[in-house]
């Protein structure tokens, strides 16, 4: 009897607790029927068409039910970045709802990088970023600057709208490029709307506009859907200090008695702990409560901040895998018999560099493939007809180390016998090898 009473008491308490914490039924989209969402969508003030259909409804369910934590997080971040985006949309006379596009692009993460190398809030590829004058070098990448990248995105979106005269097509072109949209228009028999050319667009682009519409819905009805955050994010109050030449940002923050992490948060486009501007003035954002002190003591602060870390960063720039710092771009077309090792030897670079520059996940290359190779000015590039096997004395790479490119059939013992004073253990130590396993094309340091 006591056991039964205990169970009944427990179930009663559990029921009361569940009623206290449960969200109202309307806040889950399984209760927000298709017709209800359609009705709500029609009440949203908009300049960009918000066509509603089963495809859009599926993404509404995704953002409001299946992935509620993600949606809550981007709504939390929106209070940090939307004021910046709204400012530029107004400047260029663009629809306010374009701010939601940044969520589809990056989830409002200013340091987001895609698998193909697009970066920042607006996911600019390096080439497109260069087109819109977003500065990119080893120290700075303005694709990750919320201000500069938003300005560039507004220019690009304006250009696409001028090109197509239709916002849905302009958004599709932002995702897949104007060429793919024109191709879809041709294949559709020259139809003029997104949903008429839908099945001719790339798969990713077919989902792009429906996601945008679903995000607009989720934001406009965040209160009804219980998606409003308890702790909205806000951008730190800040102002800019103009710097020139090399500046160690850690030293600067230390001298001003605030956290270096604050500089990182305010300047996500500054990629290193130091910035170098080649004697051009460049703005660095600092917390507002430190800016007056920084300007009063500017000369002495910058003198201190320029005195350490530069050589360390220069060395890192020259030796980090895939760095293009101080190099010139060459394009090499793969020929029959080529392997990455021989190409690396020809250009005096590392196999790992070539893989990084070309986003290769393996050593496999194909005849006719174009490879980007970055070399230092004045590098003597061997001709394609030059003998591919390494000379007995080894080859000097860009940082002065002697290297050997592994040939088919080579073992560590074979290689050690080619050079005086070299043994298997030394090869393993120089190359951090944990076993004797090596493969053709691999570049080994031998001295």
Image (tube, rainbow, N blue to C red):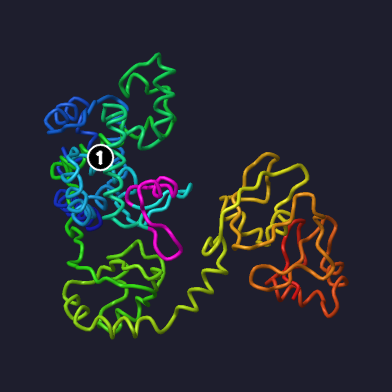
Quadrant location of the C terminus?
A: bottom right
Main SS class of the magenta portion in the image? loop
Residue appearing at x 42%, y 34% in the figure:
204
Where does residue 97 sit, x and y in percent of width and height? 20, 39
| Relative side of 115 to 110, left or right | right
Within 10 Å of disc 1 (Cα), the crowding (few <14, some 14-19, many 20+) is many
The relative height of residue 52 versus residue 90 in the rendered view (above or below) is: above
Residue 77 appears in which quarter of the rendering?
A: bottom left
The relative height of residue 384 versus residue 393 in the rendered view (above or below) is: above
Where does residue 163 sit, x and y in percent of width and height? 31, 29
Residue appearing at x 75%, y 67% in the figure:
395
Residue corresponding to mark 1: 215
Q: Nearer the viewer, residue 135 or 430?
A: 135
Q: Nearer the viewer, residue 312 or 385?
A: 385
Where does residue 337 sit, x and y in percent of width and height? 78, 45
Q: Nearer the viewer, residue 248 or 366?
A: 248
| Relative side of 125 to 32, left or right | right
The relative height of residue 440 versus residue 254 in the rendered view (above or below) is: above
Q: Examine the rendering and report whether any part of residue 1 can be seen.
A: no
Q: Magenta segment: does it hold 130? A: yes
Q: Magenta segment: does it hold 52? A: no
Residue 244 appears in which quarter of the rendering?
A: bottom left
Chain part drawn in magenta: 121-141
Classify mark 1: helix, strand or loop. Answer: helix
Q: Examine the rendering and report whether any part of residue 374 can be seen.
A: yes
Where does residue 162 sit, x and y in percent of width and height? 27, 31
Residue appearing at x 27%, y 24% in the figure:
53
| Relative side of 262 to 227, left or right | right
| Relative side of 279 to 284, left or right | right
Quadrant location of the N terminus?
A: bottom left
């Amino acid at each position: 009897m006591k056991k039964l009473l205990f169970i009944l008491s427990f179930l009663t308490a559990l029921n009361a607790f569940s009623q206290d914490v449960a969200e109202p039924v309307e806040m889950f989209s399984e209760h927000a029927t298709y017709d209800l969402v359609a009705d709500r969508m029609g009440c949203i003030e908009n300049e960009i068409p918000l066509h509603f259909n089963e495809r859009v409804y599926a993404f509404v369910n995704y953002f409001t039910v299946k992935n509620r934590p993600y949606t809550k997080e981007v709504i939390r971040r929106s209070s940090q970045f939307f004021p910046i985006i709204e400012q530029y949309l107004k400047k260029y006379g663009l629809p306010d709802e374009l701010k939601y596009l940044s969520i589809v692009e990056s989830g409002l993460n200013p340091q987001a990088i895609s698998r193909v190398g697009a970066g920042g809030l607006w996911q600019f590829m390096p080439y497109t970023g260069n087109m819109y004058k977003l500065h990119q070098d080893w120290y700075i990448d303005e694709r990750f600057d919320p201000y500069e990248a938003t300005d560039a995105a507004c220019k690009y979106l304006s250009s696409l709208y001028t090109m197509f005269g239709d916002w849905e097509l302009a958004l599709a072109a932002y995702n897949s490029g104007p060429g793919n949209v024109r191709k879809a228009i041709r294949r559709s028999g020259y139809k003029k709307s997104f949903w008429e050319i839908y099945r001719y667009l790339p798969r990713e682009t077919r989902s792009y506009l429906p996601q945008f519409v679903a995000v607009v819905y989720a934001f406009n009805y965040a209160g009804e859907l219980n998606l409003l955050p308890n702790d909205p994010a806000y951008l730190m109050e800040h102002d800019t200090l103009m710097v020139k030449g090399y500046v160690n940002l850690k030293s600067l923050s230390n001298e001003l008695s605030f956290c270096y992490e604050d500089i990182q948060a305010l300047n996500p486009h500054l990629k290193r702990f130091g910035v170098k501007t080649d004697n051009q003035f460049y703005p660095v954002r600092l917390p507002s409560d430190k800016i007056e002190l920084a300007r009063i003591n500017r000369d002495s602060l910058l003198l201190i901040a320029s005195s350490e870390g530069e050589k360390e960063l220069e060395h890192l720039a020259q030796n980090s895998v895939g760095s293009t710092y101080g190099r010139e771009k060459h394009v090499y077309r793969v020929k029959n018999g080529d392997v990455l090792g021989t190409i690396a030897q020809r250009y005096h670079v590392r196999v790992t560099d070539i893989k990084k520059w070309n986003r290769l996940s393996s050593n496999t290359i194909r005849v006719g493939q174009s490879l980007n190779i970055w070399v230092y000015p004045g590098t003597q590039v061997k001709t394609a007809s030059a003998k591919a096997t390494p000379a007995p004395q080894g080859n000097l790479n860009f940082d002065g180390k002697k290297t050997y490119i592994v040939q088919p059939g080579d073992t560590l013992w074979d290689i050690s016998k080619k050079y005086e004073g070299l043994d298997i253990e030394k090869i393993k130590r120089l190359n951090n090898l944990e076993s004797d396993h090596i493969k053709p094309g691999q570049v080994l340091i031998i001295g």
